[in-house]
Amino acid sequence: MILYNTLTRQKEELKPLEDGKVKIYTCGLTVYSQPHIGNWVSYIYWDVLVRALQAEGYDVERTQNITDVGHLTSDDDSGEDKLEKGAKREGVTAWQVADKYIKIANEEAEMLGLLKPTHLPRATAYIDQQITFVKDLESKGFTYVIPGDGVYFDTNKLKDYGKLARLDIEGLKPGARVPIDGKRNITDFAVWKFSHKGEKRDMEWESPWGTGFPGWHLECSVLARELLGDQIDIHTGGVDHIPVHHTNEIAQTESVTGKQFSQIWVHNNFLKVDGQKMAKSLGNIYTLQDILDKGYSLDAFKLLILSKHYQTEGNFTWDILEAAQNRLNNWQAAADLRYQLAGHPELVSGSGNSHNEILKQVQNDILTALSDDLDTPKAIALIDQYFSKGAPSEGTLATIRDLLGIDLLASEDISEEQKKFIADRQAAREAKDWAKSDELRDKLKEQGIEVRDTDNSPIWSRI
């Protein structure tokens, strides 16, 4: 497996710290509102990454956090906690907001057919460990307190702070990042925030420094260390995490452990809608349910995402989704040929080679593409080529399911009644009874079955 490492700005071969095992940390959702399609882009890519690693024979252990506290509306340690904001919006407690959207996120991940991470911890379940982590930073001299605000990490204590984003710290304008009075450096960040005086928050805890809650960056460092150890192989996230969130994770983790946190950092690019950033004011924020309500498959949405490389900025339009749905329909039609070619194995895959040889070639070619920096566009193009040669074997379809998470084996054969309609229609055509032929064709269409006439026999496909 070769991946582009944001830390070194070059492709690198994965060399796991532990032989045969890969440890991955994935930044998870902040569960304060309904996830939109852009939120799912990262997890679709990282799902394929895990599948490819498993196909290479690795034992993959992955932690994906659930941010249910501490993520403020601004990355500059100011603004309202997003969970508290969600609570006010819905007239419930922050705990109820978190529970509601965790349930929705889990359901939608299942709808997308994503592999469940090994560990899916809530930040609020590890408050004691986060407090202990801050104590460790304090004992090593990395923190200071701003009265009435919180405990801050002193970035000036690290010579290599900002190495992931390659920040020009001296070039940063005062106030351009984290404009909070009392900070020693403009890049310093909160590891523990105090509750405002006279305010009772839904989520707050006692600490040695005062009642409050952990900073957003802290949870990922702590959860990764608690569940995966001091060092991991791969850390994934979005490009928006590079300059602040992941930069600060590295700073605090490596200050405590004295070791390199992650060997490889992998970041996916954004998804735009109609070429624009998603925004409520533009009315271009869509959910998975919006896709389903318009009659599209979520597998088509996955194909739309995977048809672009994870480092490339994506674009969602209904026309592009329509094209992805057509591609999926073509794949499904090819997959369904296996029912129609029963008893004719020589026609499967459209090649004179043995099935085992073809299957091995398919597996190797797709996995080779994915192992080259997760080249999903190439993998999809290869599948198009294989399907153009004839009906794929069940082994080939299983490979696509296992590597891309798109299950073309899930559909069942058409009913005996529908098969009879097709046979009767063919008989009507041979008898030149066009009215009867058209009537049967229309009945099949009503049931979602389209029939295409060939020189040998009619072939059906799902509409």
Image (cartoon, grey):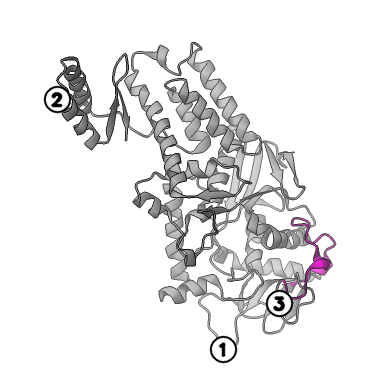
* Residue beneath disc 2: 436
Residue drawn where x is 27% and y is 32% of the image: 449
Residue type for callout 2: Lys
The mark that comes first in sequence, 1 or 3, is 3
Is 158 placed above or below 329 here?
below
Is 375 placed above or below 168 here?
above
Percent x, y of residue 65 = 57, 57
Q: Quarter-wise, where is residue 375 in the image?
A: top right
* Residue beneath disc 1: 198
Magenta part of the protein: which range? 153-176
Q: Nearer the viewer, mark 1 or mark 2?
A: 2
Return the residue nearer the eye: 104 or 204: 104
Kind of element beneath mark 1: loop
The mark that comes first in sequence, 3 or 2, is 3
* Residue beneath disc 3: 179
Percent x, y of residue 289 = 38, 54
Residue drawn where x is 54% and y is 44% of the image: 47
